[in-house]
Structure formats: structure tokens, C-alpha cells
Image: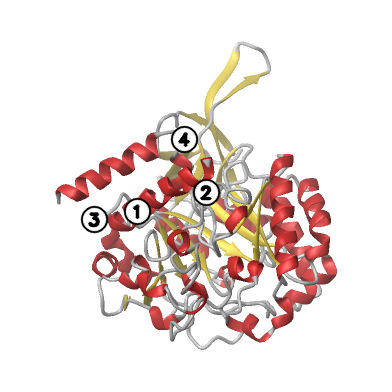
Amino acid sequence: MKINKINKWFRNILKASSLTAVMFVFQACYGTAYDDYKEDVFISGKVISKSTQQPIQGIKVSPKSESVFAITDKNGEFGFYSPRYRVTDYFDTLSAVREGYPLLFEDIDSTENGAYADTLLYINVQYQHKVEVNMQLEDAQ
Amino acid sequence: MRNKILQILFNLFKINEIKLHPLNYLFWECTQRCNLCCLHCGSDCVSDAQYKDMPFEDFLNAVLPLKNMYPPDSITVVITGGEPLLRKDLPDCGKQLRKNGFRWGIVTNGYLYDNQKHTELLSSGMGAITVSLDGLEMHHNWLRCNPKSFQNAVDAIEIIATSQRLNYDIVTCVNKLNINELEEIKQLLLSKKVKNWRLFTIAPIGRAAHNPDLHLSPKELHFLLAFIAKTRNEHKINTYFSCESYLGKYERKVRDTFFFCRAGVNIASVLIDGSISACPNIDRTFSQGNIYKDNIAEIWENKFQIMRHRQWAKKGICTTCKAFQHCKGGAMHLWDKQLTSNQACIFHRMNH
């Protein structure tokens, strides 16, 4: 047991050192590289209708400009992984500024599951691995 | 002199790593179905596979005990096949793995990889991917036995290379036909803004065992390793040789660290029939257990001795080899099931 502690201590020292950390990076002959990315977040939640309070299926939920998204299921639930980032958007005049992670809710199935207005929400995802967002969508005009 | 000291230090590191054997790389052979029929396939996969795809729940339930031994985010699950993109539930499998804390990636021939798949897999938390490109159009298609495979692979690479999120690389199996077009392949990858390029030779296993023409001569092996060393010095694309063999004077010139076969030390696998092994290309008679009757955490902790302690490997071509202290018999997948000898040691081939 004592030897094992020394072995672990030796390993941690090597791993922490910039000179020897490279020894821990490997890839099996026929495998991928490691995934050691730390900057992503799981965004999940539920979308319901503001007027009926019922879950809405078929809403596309995505960050405005990234190639990740999810479509709500029959329970109105969604979930996807995304890199964490923060934008500052200016609307019309400099006085209308929104900051944060831009989460866009789009009704992409026309009137099949009702018709709802697209909504853009800015949320805070900094330093978080999981964020839950429950959204109520207005009926389309 | 400096390299000799570093090699000794690295050997100490290996002893320590073997003693602790932290598992941080887990293959899942999720299917044996494949949409190509490559001449060099190490798995001998076919479109009409002998085994049904493994139900994801079976795999997940089997690997959950590993969370009690290691932080799950220190384990990358590498989903392989066959061709994993043939599984329609692949994004769901990946998402469940991430929800349980594991990281994951796939090894693919790229044939079915398009923008939609890319988005689905990224949204499901995929973090790593490897795509094969085995030459320019004529030779890639010849090796992959499909006239569209080159274009589809290049299209996939183009999509993947745009992602800031993915840790990816492109792999090329070097053989007698594509060895003279390595420079052109490099230029192609550079034009697609690829950052990582891994090259390896074709091991005489699976279907490739019956194609001796795919294997490089000693002169060609020297040429390949010199090409990699030269390309690394250019610093335009991160190029490296795979971990398939000890390489003598080329050690650390063609990859960042010295040779270390980590099969059974850091690498395990769950194969299509539930067998627990190390890399999937290792002869299946070396399986250490089966998820349908054993606890993978206990198997990992108590078995795998044949891969961790390699004194037995001093036989066959390794008997009198001066490099044995560094390589301990080389890559485990190059040993036949009778353990008679390493079947394709590159160091041996280059020197004989």
C-alpha cells in the first residue's frame, strides 16, 4: 500500500511537470486522441407553450452561430453539448446591448405542433458544466 | 547521450505506469458491420457481420463500475467497429456516455460523415475523431475497394478540420503503392487545414495477413520514418508515427515520446461479443474476461498480467535483440496466439 502511494506521488509529479507531461499523452495504434477539452457545457431543459402550459415538440434549440443543436421531444425536453462562450450583441442602437451565451428557440416544423415565435435568450454558462433552461414560448402572431 | 538518459528515465516511468495501470483509454467495438471492405482491414469486418451490434445498455452497465476506480472524465471511450457510423443510435450512445462522465470519440472511414452527422455527434458531446485517408484518389479507393471512398473521406476531413472543439487526426496506412505520394497527401491535408497526421504501416493481421504486397521493405521503412522526421521539422502539420514498434535511432524523431505498448496498462476494450481485452486488434485469444459474466473493474485490476509483464516475450526474434529492455517485445497486437514471436517488428525488419 505504501509503495502504491509512492508510485502515485511519483506519477503526479511527472504529470504536473511541463518537461515530463508529454509522457502521459498517448494514442492507441488504431484509436483516436484523448478528449481532454474542458470548456464545454451541457445545456438542457424543457420548452412549453406560454398560453397552454403544455410541452412543445419540434422546437430547435441552438446557440446562434455554432454547429450544435437539439430538437425538443414530445415532452418538450432537449439537451446538447456546446463549447462555452460569451458574445456581446448590439441591437439597433448601442443602448440595446445583450451579453452572454445566445440560445435561440426556433419553431422549425411550421404549424405541425402549433406555431410559436422564435425567441433569443442570453444565458450565463461561464465556469459551468451543466445549465438547465426552462422556456415558455409565445404563440406566433 | 541525452537520448540514452531520457530513455532510462522513460523506462522508469513505464515500470511505475505498469504498477499503477490507470485505465484511461477504453475501446468499444460497437459493431462489426462495415460499409467498406478494405484490403488491409485488421478486424476482417464485413457488411454482413457474424455478431449483432452490442446493445448500448450492455456496454454502459458493464463500464459503470469503472467510475468507482477512476474519475470517468479521465477515461476516453473510443467507439470503433466495423464502422461506428452505421449505428443509428450512435449520438444517443455518446450522449449517455457523456452524461455518465466519460469522454468519447470515434474511429471512422469517413464514408458516411456529413454535416448532419457532424452536428449530431458534436451536440452529443463527441470530443475526438480519427479519419482514415490512405493515399490519393486512386490508391485510397483501391485499398478501400470503393470508387467513392476517397472523395467522401476528403469531404469528411474538410468538415472536421473546421471544428475548434474536436481533437482529431487523419491516419494513413502506408503501403507500397502510396509511399511515393506522401508529399502530395501532406499537401492535400495542409490545403484542408488539417493539424494532425498520423502514419502507420500495415500489420499482417486480419485481412492484411494475406496481402504481403501491402508490407513495406526495409528500405521503404527507412524512407517513411525519414519522411516523418523531416515533416516534423517543418512544423507545418503535426506528423507522427503510430505506437506500433520500437524504432531505434528514429525514436523521438518521429513521435513525441519513446515507444511504450500500453495495451493492458492504460488501454482496455470491450469487444463485440462482450470479451474484455486491450486494443481490439490484439488476437482475441488474449481476452481476459467477458462483460456478460465478469466485472470489468475486477478484471482490469487483477488480470492482464500477460500484457503488463513481458519477460515472456524474450523469444523468437526478440531472443537476442539488444533493444528488448526498451520495447519488451513490441506491440502486443503483433504477437500471434501461440506467442511464438513478434510477427512484424519494424526495428527488426529495418536491421535485417
Residue position marked by numbered label 1 in the rendering: B17
Residue position marked by numbered label 4 in the rendering: A19
Callout 4 touching callout 3 (CB < 8 Å)? no
- Image coords of residue B212 (percent x, y): 70, 82
**Alpha-carbon neighbours of circle 1 within 10 Å: few (<14), some, or many (≥20)?**
many
Q: Give the residue type that dot 4 points to.
A: Leu
Instruction: Chain letter for mark 2, please.
Output: B
- State whether discs 4 and 2 lie on one chain: no
Q: Give the residue type that dot 1 points to.
A: Glu
- Image coords of residue A56 (percent x, y): 48, 51
Callout 4 touching callout 1 (CB < 8 Å)? no
Residue B176 lies in quadrant? bottom right
Q: Can you tell which of label 1 and label 3 is closer to the viewer?
A: 1
**Alpha-carbon neighbours of circle 3 within 10 Å: few (<14), some, or many (≥20)?**
few
Residue A9 lies in quadrant? top left
Q: What is the secondary structure assignment of the residue under circle 4? A: loop
Please tell me which of labels 2 and 3 falls first in the chain.
3
Instruction: Chain letter for mark 4, please.
Output: A
Q: What is the secondary structure assignment of the residue under circle 2? A: loop
Alpha carbon of mark 4 to alpha carbon of mark 2: how far?
12 Å
Residue position marked by numbered label 3 in the rendering: B68
Q: Is residue A70 left or right of residue A108?
A: left
Q: Give the residue type that dot 2 points to.
A: Thr
Q: Is residue B204 left or right of residue B69?
A: right
Residue position marked by numbered label 2 in the rendering: B257
Alpha carbon of mark 4 to alpha carbon of mark 3: how far?
31 Å
Alpha carbon of mark 1 to alpha carbon of mark 3: how far?
20 Å
Please tell me which of labels 2 and 1 falls first in the chain.
1
**Alpha-carbon neighbours of circle 2 within 10 Å: few (<14), some, or many (≥20)?**
some
Question: Which of B195/A126 is in front?
Answer: B195
